[in-house]
Image (cartoon, rainbow, N blue to C red):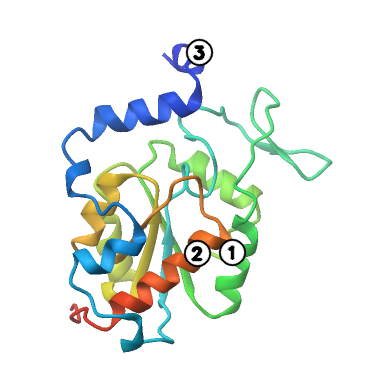
Amino acid sequence: MFQTLYKIPKIVLKHYRKIVQEPLLSKFILKSTSSACADLHYKSESMCPMAKPKLVVFDLDYTLWPFWVDTHVDAPFTMGSNGKVYDAHHKHVKYYPDVPGILSQLHGEGIYLGIASRTSMPAEASDLTRLFNWDQFFHYRQIYPGCKITHFKKLHQQSGIPYEDMIFFDDEHRNIHDVSSLGVTCILVEDGVTKECLKKGMETFRECKGTKKPTS
């Protein structure tokens, strides 16, 4: 099965997989972060200009790194003498370039960080975050298949942080749709998390913060 997938260009495979899995959800999804608050009847940024999230949560596949860990790379993963990470076929395993700086920045600001991934290979995903030296940044992690509402309910229970004080970055419409129903500010990632994406996410959070009702 995986050999067949490799013959298809990855960008085509990515969108095909989403179309197959999410045929009915796209019409419910907000088209851009700039329109999110208008669609949800949120107030303007002036309501809470300095607000920051207490917990920032990231998906993994196509959010922090440009592949599906259960499809495009093969464990075991190792670190070479050059400091780069390789898979079982000595393929260089890369992450999006802005990610280390973003994680370090948020951690330095005292913001808690978490992972919410629905990959079917949680052990392998955890190996990569360790080899990338990201475990120093993450306080919470929920990595297993299933609806991400479950992931966020567990994150809420573990952290005690209200949903309205969380922000979530993910590349799939269905996850944005599901998690936003809890009151979490959700940002659709198009080509991995970047500094500009983070900036827009924080602006959206500030715009939304003023009208979100507290959750228990």
Element class at badge 1: helix
Say which residue label 1 marks.
102
Q: Label 1 vs label 2: CA separation?
A: 8 Å
Circles 1 and 2 in contact, beta carbons < 8 Å: yes
Quarter of the view holding residue 157: bottom left
Which mark sits nearer the N-terminus, 3 or 2?
Answer: 3
Q: Furthest residue to the right? A: 81
Say whether residue 200 is left or right of residue 161: right
Residue 129's x, y, as percent? Answer: 57, 50
Give the mark count. 3
Q: Between residue 170 and residue 71, name the one nearer to us.
A: 170
Q: Earlier in the sequence, mark 1 or mark 3?
A: 3
The residue drawn where x is 61% and y is 77% is 108
Task: Kindly report the distance in space between the C-alpha atoms of the residues bearing marks 1 and 3.
Answer: 33 Å
Q: Mark 3: which secondary structure? A: loop
| Residue that numbered label 2 is attached to | 198
From the top left corner, tell me how far across and down residue 39 is, in percent.
Answer: 20, 64
Tag in front: 3 or 2: 2
